[in-house]
Amino acid sequence: SQTIHQWPATLVQPVGSPLSLECTVEGTSNPNLYWYRQAAGRGLQLLFYSVGIGQISSEVPQNLSASRPQDRQFILSSKKLLLSDSGFYLCAWSAGHFNEQYFGPGTRLTVT
Amino acid sequence: QKEVEQNSGPLSVPEGAIASLNCTYSDRGSQSFFWYRQYSGKSPELIMSIYSNGDKEDGRFTAQLNKASQYVSLLIRDSQPSDSATYLCAVILTGGGNKLTFGTGTQLKVEL
């Protein structure tokens, strides 16, 4: 069966510091991978998605970037965090024709 | 008009009753529809997917799709306190490829 991991689970970072969040998927090959952010009391915002190694599509202009160095690894990064970057960051994967997406446990980021 | 709309609630139902959650979407060409359940502080969990008009049943859950009226609903029979959560409707819009567009969710409270 497929499993998706995210780490860390929680993170408190000062404004201006860098960020690296990692997501890995097990049990499937060539998945589509997604990064979402959910701000407090808000809906899910798609940040990036990837259909293959090195292929990244950005949905929202911001100070975040994403990379996919391996088939089942997706990384979200920032060089300098802003207060507005606080939120719940979710990685998801999908595969196959129907594109059902499955979410990881998430990383709760607080920028202070 | 939002692309995917849900009443934010909260929707309160007594234990054992049927909970009815509704979602409307703006893109008439949409073909794929999903319901996610999100407990407070947790990541969304896929509970139902539906692709053709009519009803789809899975245990206590029934998804209903009406493409002509552009709405999708989720019925929860014999509601339990453990069903208390936020329910997110998601749609793949025309030309959206693999991307889901989420509503902001409906909070359901099942009361003893």
Image: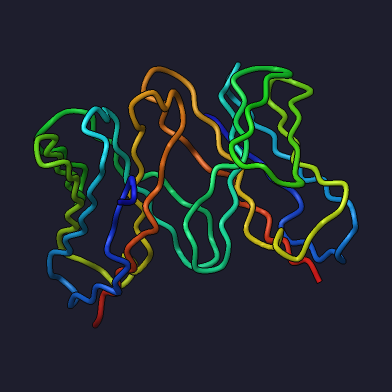
Please provide percent x and percent y for residue A97: 38, 17
Q: Is residue A31 above or below residue B70?
A: above
Which residue is at a point 30% across and 74% down the rendered structure image? B10
Report the colour scheme: rainbow
Residue at image point 53% right, 43% down: A103
A70 relative to A15 in the view: left or right: left
Left or right, residue A94 beside residue B69: right
Give the percent coordinates (x, y) of residue A7: 74, 48
Taking the spot 60% from the left edge, 51% from the top edge, the residue there is: A37
Measured as percent of width and height from the top left, residue A94 is found at: 50, 28
Q: Quadrant of residue A70?
A: top right
> Total marks drawn?
0
B106 to the left or right of A89 = left
Nearest to the observer: residue B53 or residue A95: B53
Quadrant in the picture for residue B65: top left
Please provide percent x and percent y for residue A27.
59, 25
Viewer-closest of B47 and A98 = A98
Quadrant including the C terminus of chain A:
bottom right
Residue at the bottom extreme of this rendering: B112
The structure residue drawn at horizontal position 33% and vertical position 26%, both measured from the top left corner, is B94
Q: Nearer the viewer, residue A95 or A28?
A: A95
Residue sticking out furthest to the front: B1
Rendered view: A94 above or below B108: above
